[in-house]
Amino acid sequence: MMGLALVAMILGVGFGVHAALFFRGANKAEATIVEMIQRSGDQGTMYAPVFVFADSEGRTQKVFSSVSSFPPIGSVGDKITVLYDPQNPKGAAEDTFFRIWGLSAILGGCGTFYLALFWLVWFITKQKMTTANQRRQATV
């Protein structure tokens, strides 16, 4: 259990560093949602936006979001803010907390929670074993 918690924390930090580097070098642009793609899954229908924006060189970029949500981030015609790497504008992402930091927050949070839980169980078990050993030695 502790190993899994550490792996989750390490992955969370890794994805967090990746997100921070992306965020640091990204340009902001205003995009327009031109389509909402419906995706059906176990949790029901989710919506992924397709948006267009002009990059820093004035070229129009059309991006299909890899993230679906319910409720949708917006409707066709709505304006949203996107972040993009000038070297790879097709990799643009919606400027939302979950889109940029979500994976690192979830993995890091789960890893931290389970590591704290493991530590707490270990500490309580150690205390009980120490108390039991002291009682046994006192009766000998």
Image: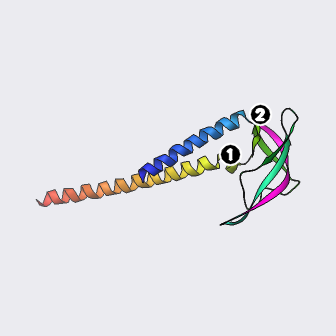
User: Circle 2 sits in a helix, a strand or a loop, which is it?
Assistant: loop
**In magenta segment, residue 70:** no
Mark 2 lies on residue: 86
**Mark 2 neighbour density, 10 Å: few (under 14) some (14–19) many (20 or more):** some
- In the rendered image, residue 99, in percent from the top left (x then y), is placed at 69, 49
Above or below 81: residue 77: below
Q: State the quadrant of the N terminus.
A: bottom left
Please identify the residue farthest to the left as the structure is shown: 140
Q: Which mark is residue 13?
A: none
Q: CA–CA distance between discs 1 and 2?
A: 17 Å
| Quarter occupied by residue 126 | bottom left
**In magenta segment, residue 38:** yes
Q: 57 or 74: nearer the eye?
A: 57
Mark in front: 1 vs 2: 2
Mark 1 lies on residue: 100
- In the rendered image, residue 76, in percent from the top left (x then y), is placed at 86, 56
Above or below 64: residue 139: below
Q: 68 or 20: nearer the eye?
A: 68
Q: Which tag, 1 or 2, sits closer to the chain's start?
A: 2
Give me the residue at 77% from left, 33% from top: 86
Give me the residue at 88% from left, 35% from top: 58
Specify start and end residues of the magenta stretch as a single range: 27-39
- In the rendered image, residue 16, in percent from the top left (x then y), is placed at 60, 42
**Mark 1 neighbour density, 10 Å: few (under 14) some (14–19) many (20 or more):** many
User: Circle 1 sits in a helix, a strand or a loop, which is it?
Assistant: helix
Above or below 70: residue 51: above
Q: What is the chief secondary structure element of the magenta stretch?
A: strand
Left or right, residue 38 beside residue 13: right
Give me the residue at 82% from left, 40% from top: 29
Disc 1 residue type?
Ile
Disc 2 residue type?
Pro
- In the rendered image, residue 9, in percent from the top left (x then y), is placed at 51, 46
